[in-house]
Image (tube, rainbow, N blue to C red):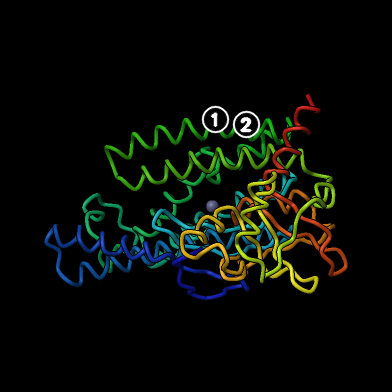
Amino acid sequence: MKYAVELGKPFGIRVSVHWTFLLIIAWVVFIDLQQGLNLSQIAYSVLFVLSIFVCVVLHELSHSLMARRYGINTRGITLLPIGGVADLERMPDDPRQELAVSLAGPLMNVAIALLLWIFLSVAGAMKLEPGNFQEITHSNFLMILMFANIMLAVFNLVPAFPLDGGRVFRSLLALKMSRDDATYVAMNIGKVFAFFIAIWGIYANPFLIFIAIFIYIGAQREYEMVKYTSVLSGYTVNDVLMHEYTPLHPDDPIKRAVDILLDGPEQRFIVVEDDRVKGILTRNDIIQGLMQYDQETEVRRIMNTQVTTFPADTSLEKAYEQMRNQQITMAPVMKNEQLAGLIDLDNINEFLMVRRAMRR
Ligand SMILES: [Zn+2]
């Protein structure tokens, strides 16, 4: 993720924090100052926020390590002001495995709460008088942290897909119905929860509104992904390969790309030199290029040199997901180190529509 700073690599999983996380610390300090707290009181509340985020990292790590048991890697864990995100390569298709991966996070918070409870009980430091919750001090720090972990577990288990509880709900439904239908039901329930969480946020805490938006968009996005990938499973990129295209050479003038663009259906180009893909050029790059340079400028100056390529036997599901996630509209496909053709997002979308229509 952009603008994130890496903190470390526990179990080989990169943990980073997004810069907006600093806003939360600033916000806590601001509220404390407004309430007239002194420096040591402010230090305790900042330390508390940091401790919560350590618990959030442990929660996400727990998801990641459970997923690893099923052979699924995690690209990284990022801390955002609204919580942590473990970027798993995918969720397991088997509902039982998804259930285990989804429960692993909240169970980690339950485990932390349980350990703190045992420790506090043994130390005789469990003081549940109401007056003991108003302000965080060295004497109630661990007790409040224990309750915060219980709240983290409870909140994550709300069945608002794609929160953990929603995933648990989806996997239970998927034991009885298709993954498509289960996700559809979970998405709609997730959206209803998002609506109520947003309203609650208006009265209680603006952060809840962000969480509601995150749930709403996430639910829709995941449903679309499942709807599509169920159609795509069993195909490889070789099945949607396009052979009809006009390769450009890095020394070609922008004018040549413009001519082809205006002359036919091609909107995106690959730039090839000595049988090697040097870059790609989208319609947008061409327009931007023309605003900066003249028509005789070589395309090498305006092409994208960061090219994602796929081997021809890549599953279509995987390629599609990666293209959507990384917002790649076109990618060269390689067969035995040789350029075999192109795949294009619009073209895959057409393939999807046709397949879905044929299914009905
Ligand atoms: Zn979780």
Residue 106 seen in the current view: no
Q: Where is residue 311 in the image (x, y as percent from the top left)?
A: 81, 62
Quarter the C terminus occupies:
top right
Q: Residue furthest left?
A: 36
Q: In which quarter of the image is residue 86?
A: bottom right
Judging from the image, what secondary structure is the residue with disc 2 in?
helix
Q: Which residue lies furthest to the right in this view?
A: 336
In the rendered structure, the answer to whether residue 215 lies left or right of residue 180 reads left
In the rendered structure, the answer to whether residue 191 lies left or right of residue 252 reads left
In this view, 208 is above or below 17: above
Q: Where is residue 26 in the image (x, y as percent from the top left)?
A: 26, 64
In the rendered structure, the answer to whether residue 144 lies left or right of residue 321 reads left
Report the residue marked by disc 2.
184
Is disc 2's CB within 8 Å of ligand 1? Answer: no
Tell me the residue at 77%/71% (across/down): 276
Residue 11 seen in the current view: yes
In this view, 130 is above or below 18: above
Tag 1: amino acid = Asn
Q: Where is residue 146 in the image (x, y as percent from the top left)?
A: 40, 57
Tell me the residue at 40%/61% (across/down): 52
Report the residue marked by disc 1.
188
Q: Position of residue 58 (x, y in %)?
A: 52, 63
In the rendered structure, the answer to whether residue 58 lies left or right of residue 148 reads right
Measured Cα–Cα span from mark 1 to mark 2: 6 Å
10 Å neighbourhood of mark 1: few (<14), some, or many (≥20)?
Answer: some
Tag 2: amino acid = Tyr
**Contact (Cβ within 8 Å) of mark 1 with mark 2:** yes
